[in-house]
Amino acid sequence: MLREKLPLYHGSKEIVRVPEIRIPKYNKDFYIGFYCTLYADQAVRWATRFNGTGYLNEYEYTPNDSLKVKKFSGMSEEWLDFIVDCRLGKSHDFDIVEGPMANDTIFNYVQNFVDGKISREAFWALAKFKHPTHQISFHTMKALETLTFLRERKIGDEK
């Protein structure tokens, strides 16, 4: 099946011409991987979150039907359970995972759910009013090969 190429963005404190998977200090939504988004403004927030400056890296993503891909179309019970497992350090065998992002606010709700401070029902009541976000994470070298670096743009020092 021929699939359309998509632009993806990665916000970082550095230019990332060759994406790589790095072990983070904390487990992320979809576990260890290289994270991108369809939304440039979201990647800009990622790039500038620490000191107000960074780089918006743009890639062309060419889907590969031979890869094992998990896609969440929205926040769902399955999505919540997957994120909880990943945040608790449980790995998975997907090459690529795509879906909504548990931003800082949503993550606090997820953590409260994991800690037993709120019920599943309370999580959904709190989460339903949050604006949509997007992330796509690449978990294997074969997955990273679907990305082609296009350009970078320095963010945060525009005068």
Image: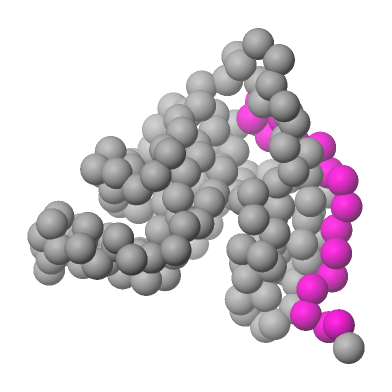
Work out whether residue 111 can be spotted. Answer: no
Structure colour scheme: one colour
Q: Judge from the rendering whether residue 119 lies leftward or rightward of residue 133; answer left or right.
A: left
Q: Is residue 141 above or below residue 90?
A: above
Residue range in magenta is 142-158
Answer with the quarter of the image where residue 6 lies: top right
Q: Judge from the rendering whether residue 61 lies leftward or rightward of residue 15; answer left or right.
A: left
Residue at image coords 71%, 52%: 9
Work out whether residue 25 can be spotted. Answer: yes
Q: How many discs mark residues in the rendered view?
A: 0
Residue at image coords 79%, 73%: 155
| Frontmost residue, 111 versus 127 | 127
Residue at image coords 79%, 51%: 58
Q: Is residue 137 above or below residue 58?
A: above
| Frontmost residue, 73 versus 105 | 73
Q: In the image, is residue 90 part of the stretch drawn in magenta? A: no
Q: Is residue 16 above or below residue 147?
A: below
Residue at image coords 20%, 63%: 125
Q: Quick one: which residue is furthest to the top in this view?
A: 1
